Amino acid sequence: MRFDFDWVDAFTDRPFGGNGCAVVHGGAALSAETCMAYVRETSLVECTFTGPSDVADLRVRYFLASREIPFAGHPTIATVAALRHRGLIGDGPLQLETGAGIVPVDVAGDTITMTQVAPTFGAEIPADLVAAVGSIDPGDIVSPPQVVSTGLPFCVTVLRDRAAIDHLRLDPYAHATYAEALGHRSLDMMEPYWITMGGATETGDTYARLLIARPGPPEDPFTGSATGAAACYLWARGLLDRPDFVAEQGHGMGRPGQAQVSVTGPRNAITGVTVAGQGCVVMSGDVFLPAEGEER
């Protein structure tokens, strides 16, 4: 079957920055196996597949190379940018049906703002266990690592400075131990999201990295869902002076990305978080995917 697709770099206003995502319009009915194979074909971290929704303006399915996930940040920005590029939407509010629930989005020119759900704060993870995953010293971690989710869980880990975050190297054996301790069968799940105060540029307030286990690429250029989770962590723990800030990621990869982030609610009762950015369409065309094994 033929589908329209757009390849979009999210959290950037120019090609080859931020994080890429291929958006397959009308592909939500495809089988999970086909969607995962498509992600592997692109060598991207994630791709989205859209379709009609009975409860929102559009249904969006999110896929890694290995599995479907309920929600992801940069693919949401990419999907909406692709819809705008094709003239399917204009400025104003939009609701997306995702596996994590309804995600409200607002479009204002080139800026796309998504509202992630109120955070769920999970277990704190021993610093030595997390540090080993990134091949760093536990002393480089300056706040207790904790699992936080605003639609997709991450172990938010705050490092002392840019030097520590630049030194990160994924240790697959330590990562397997970490995954087992967290009760995960799959290694490509809930990798630590490493963040430090101070941006990569003069306009940034935080800088982050996400190293990825196989079969995905080795690193994610910009992680919108983790940005929201980390924002809630930083605000709740008093590491941010104000709830509005600029998050940066991807600069060390040569793919700089930036988002405007705002946490809503007091530190002890956060009600949500907005993450805003732009998307740049790099290429558009036709993709031909097998229709057998379709699912709704």
Image: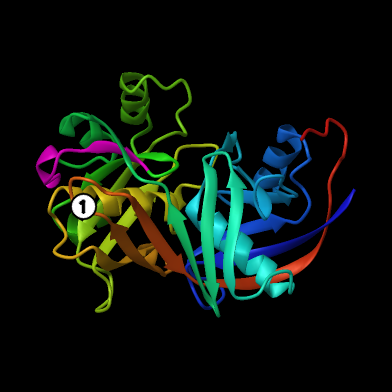
How many residues crowd around disc 1 within 10 Å: few (fewer than 14), some, or many (20 or more)?
Answer: many
Location of the C terminus by quadrant is: top right
Residue sticking out furthest to the front = 55
Report the front residue among 3 and 83: 83
Residue 169 visible in rendering: no
Q: What kind of element bears circle 1?
A: helix
Query: Tag 1: residue type?
Result: Leu
Residue 93 visible in rendering: yes
Q: Residue at x 38, y 32 (%)?
A: 172
**Quarter of the view holding residue 123:** top left
How many labels sit on residues? Answer: 1
Left or right: 259, with 206 as reference point: right
Report the front residue among 79 and 281: 79
Q: Residue at x 59, y 34 (%)?
A: 66
Left or right: 190, with 82 as reference point: left
Report the front residue among 186 and 69: 69
Q: Which residue is mark 1?
A: 234
Q: Is residue 148 magenta?
A: yes
- Point out residue 230 in the picture as x, y percentages from the top left corner: 29, 50
Vertical order, 15 against 268 (above or below): below
Q: Residue at x 61, y 68 (%)?
A: 81
Q: Which residues are magenta?
A: 138-149
- Point out residue 194 in the picture as x, y percentages from the top left corner: 28, 49
- Colour scheme of this structure image? rainbow
Report the front residue among 154 and 163: 154
Residue sticking out furthest to the right = 1
Vertical order, 118 against 123 (above or below): below
Left or right: 116, with 31 as reference point: left
- Point out residue 272 in the picture as x, y percentages from the top left corner: 35, 52
**Quarter of the view holding residue 85:** bottom right
Vertical order, 245 against 103 (above or below): below
Left or right: 224, with 82 as reference point: left
